[in-house]
């Protein structure tokens, strides 16, 4: 190839417009200012560590820094950052061919042998330049032995040696190496700076480009200058054979496989409104014109993040890469959607994007993600739902003040609450003894001003007792409280309430010391739960409407029900074994054994109570699996279901 043809050989934009001095380096002003001050004060370090994402200029900065260290021109014989005029060594350094500036790719030279070569060569002075500069790219790829071998030389190198490291994985570099270097974090370049750089290149290349196309390229580059220039190079080639060669936004969208931003906003609106049909139709239309399902969901998540940010940071609207539709409609959504709804949608989208990316049918997977999102859009958030359910059950009401308790003669005030009705509308009311009536105004949560962002307590208002308001909905009846005077009464109430778990706790872990109305002393035994006192206190308060004194005693209590039943059962087994008929059966069938002893006058139809079922399951799990249906009876029975959960 001739020299003329070599001069006209095409070079990609990322190489053609690669910065050659610090003035051309965009987006890294903090680093440039620090280096400029250091060079002016002659405080030049022996090693530098450059880190950042791909394409932000780490290797380019390393070469410019090597050029600044070895700059020589006329009467300038010292390191300087003023590189406006090419010096003696500048061209060869920027081309990577200078003998005293050694570049090494640590990805392909990872071993200790490569580091030994560096250690052996640092003792020799540079051939022609002021400093011998070692540029090691992707330094995190070095082995542990290589890092260790470099430590001593890196800490005390000869005066004529400088090290410049570059890496995208700073966390993989040992702290012992980092502590010996001056570290510079090259930040991502803002979209506005990227757009200005691309406009400059477009002017140099004589290319006409739409602002919308530049915005899409800058957004896709994610702060990487090299990525932005490479995508712009591709967009120019894409538009070269069409009309006047102008780079259009629609062409860039097709090239990148992106969805129309306005269409993404429409999809977001359908999802947040709970319109499944419109959401699926919109996704299909975007898919038909070339948008990838995973890309659509990613853009949807990006817009969701933008809407959430707008709730707290108004300056987010100043981003020049945003379209007018994104700014106007994003602001509207940020004012109507609560952070809880937005946060829930964000979590579902993150999970959904990974599902779509790994699915053999991306469109179908994306459809299912949108179905989940639209169904969840108008649902209450988990904490709202818990609060509503708790209020419905009468468990979340402030305790009466000491003044009202004293006026009531010290008697405990029955608990009451005001809650939102299950159908989401209307109001419910209960009266507190010697207090005002509480009325709840319920507001719907779907896409209403301030929905989900207000404290439900703000809807409570006090109404004087003298003129009670007219309530259209049916008030809740006052709860019916139980009378519990003994431990047997407590067991009977647990039986009537079908609280199987609590009954098993009383049977297995409760050793009675004393029991009188309003006060219980007991000793927890067995594998009693740590919160057994709180459980007892809550049940007694809910069932009697009074506060009980529940005390864990150090005195020896009576035997638990389980212990009494076990002793009785063992005695029954012993009596059965000496029965002549049973003994004859056991002798005739050596592998047979007594599973249970039943009496004709037993209360239970099959001779088993809950305790016996539990013991049978724990002692003979294999048999219980085979006989579970017969023992448990109808699985639709609530008590049976609870007991089944207990055994699991």
Image (spheres, rainbow, N blue to C red):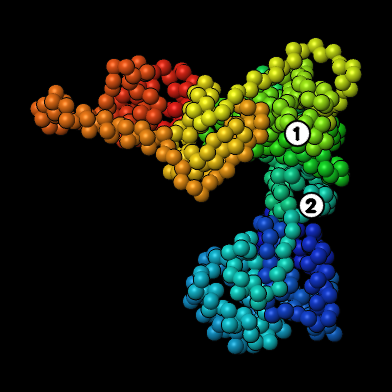
Residue drawn at 36 percent across, 27 percent down:
613
Whether residue 171 is visible here, answered yes or no, is yes
Residue marked by disc 1: 410
| Element under disc 2 | loop
Quadrant housing residue 586: top left
Q: CA distance from mark 1 to mark 2?
A: 68 Å
Q: Exactly how many numbered labels are in the figure?
A: 2
Residue 261 is at least partly visible in this image: no
Q: Are marks 1 and 2 in contact (CB under 8 Å)?
A: no
Compared across the picture, whether 543 is left or right of 183 comes to left
* 10 Å crowding of disc 2: few (<14), some (14-19), many (20+): some
The residue at the far left in this view is 588
The location of residue 289, given as percent across then percent down, is 67, 27
| Point 80% across, 77% down: residue | 38
- Judging from the image, what secondary structure is the residue with disc 1 in? loop
In the image, 446: left or right of 393?
right
- Quadrant that contains the C terminus: top left
State whether residue 318 is above or below residue 561. below
Front one among 217 and 112: 112
Q: Earlier in the sequence, mark 1 or mark 2?
A: 2
Residue 433 percent across, percent down from the top left? 78, 25
Task: Please identify, in this view, whether the residue under mark 1 or under mark 2 is nearer the observer.
Answer: 1
Residue 351 drawn above or below residue 594: below
Residue 53: name its quadrant: bottom right
- Looking at the image, residue 489 sits to the left or right of residue 246; the answer is left
For label 2, the residue is 190
Residue shown at 84%/75% (left/top)?
37
């Amino acid at each position: 190839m001739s020299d003329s043809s070599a001069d006209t050989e095409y070079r990609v934009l990322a190489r053609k417009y690669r910065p050659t001095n610090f003035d051309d380096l965009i987006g890294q002003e903090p680093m440039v200012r620090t280096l400029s001050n250091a060079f002016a004060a002659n405080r030049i370090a022996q090693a530098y560590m450059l880190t950042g994402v791909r394409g932000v200029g780490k290797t380019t900065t390393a070469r410019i820094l090597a050029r600044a260290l070895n700059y020589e021109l006329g009467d300038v014989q010292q390191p300087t950052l003023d590189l406006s005029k090419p010096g003696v060594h500048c061209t060869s350094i920027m081309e990577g061919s200078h003998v005293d500036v050694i570049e090494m790719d640590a990805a392909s030279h990872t071993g200790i042998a490569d580091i030994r070569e560096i250690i052996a060569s640092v003792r020799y002075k540079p051939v022609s330049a002021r400093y011998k500069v070692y540029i090691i790219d992707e330094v995190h790829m070095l082995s542990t032995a290589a890092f260790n071998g470099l430590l001593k030389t890196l800490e005390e190198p000869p005066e004529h040696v400088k090290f410049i490291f570059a890496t995208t994985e700073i966390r993989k570099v040992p702290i012992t190496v980092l502590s010996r270097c001056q570290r510079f974090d090259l930040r991502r370049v803002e979209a506005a700076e990227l757009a200005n750089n691309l406009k400059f290149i477009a002017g140099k290349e004589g290319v006409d480009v739409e602002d919308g196309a530049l915005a899409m390229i800058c957004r896709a580059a994610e702060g990487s200058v090299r990525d932005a220039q490479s995508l712009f190079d591709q967009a120019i080639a894409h538009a070269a054979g069409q009309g006047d060669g102008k780079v259009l936004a629609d062409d860039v969208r097709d090239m990148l496989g992106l969805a129309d931003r306005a269409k993404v906003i429409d999809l977001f609106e359908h999802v947040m409104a709970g319109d499944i049909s419109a959401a699926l139709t919109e996704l299909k239309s975007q898919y038909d014109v070339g948008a990838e399902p995973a890309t659509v969901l990613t853009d949807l998540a990006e817009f969701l993040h933008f809407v959430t940010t707008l709730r707290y940071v108004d300056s987010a609207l100043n981003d020049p890469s945003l379209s007018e539709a994104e700014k106007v409609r994003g602001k509207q959504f940020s004012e109507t959607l609560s952070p809880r709804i937005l946060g829930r949608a964000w979590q579902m989208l993150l999970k959904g994007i990974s599902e779509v990316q790994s699915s053999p049918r991306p469109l179908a997977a994306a459809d299912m993600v949108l179905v989940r999102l639209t169904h969840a859009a108008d649902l209450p958030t988990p904490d709202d739902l818990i609060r509503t359910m708790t209020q419905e059950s009468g468990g979340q009401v402030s305790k009466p003040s000491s003044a009202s308790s004293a006026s009531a003669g010290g008697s405990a005030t029955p608990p009451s609450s005001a809650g939102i009705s299950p159908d989401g509308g209307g109001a419910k009311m209960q009266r507190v003894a010697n207090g005002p009536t509480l009325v709840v105004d319920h507001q719907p949560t779907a896409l209403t001003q301030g929905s989900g962002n207000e404290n439900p307590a703000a809807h409570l208002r006090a109404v004087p007792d003298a003129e009670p308001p007219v309530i259209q909905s049916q008030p809740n009846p006052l709860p019916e409280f139980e009378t519990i005077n003994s431990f047997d009464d407590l067991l009977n109430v647990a039986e009537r309430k079908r609280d199987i778990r609590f009954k098993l706790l009383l049977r297995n872990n409760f050793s009675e010391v004393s029991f009188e109305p309003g006060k219980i002393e007991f000793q927890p035994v067995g594998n009693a739960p740590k919160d057994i006192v709180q459980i007892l206190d809550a049940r007694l308060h809910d069932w009697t409407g009074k506060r009980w004194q529940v005390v864990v005693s150090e005195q020896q209590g009576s035997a638990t029900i389980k212990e009494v039943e076990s002793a009785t059962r063992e005695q029954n087994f012993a009596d059965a074994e000496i029965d002549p008929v049973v003994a004859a059966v056991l002798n005739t069938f050596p592998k047979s054994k007594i599973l249970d002893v039943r009496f004709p006058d037993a209360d239970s139809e099959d001779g088993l109570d809950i305790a016996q079922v539990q013991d049978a399951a724990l002692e003979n799990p294999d048999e219980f699996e085979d006989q579970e249906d017969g023992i448990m009876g109808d699985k639709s029975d609530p008590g049976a279901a609870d007991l089944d959960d207990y055994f699991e």
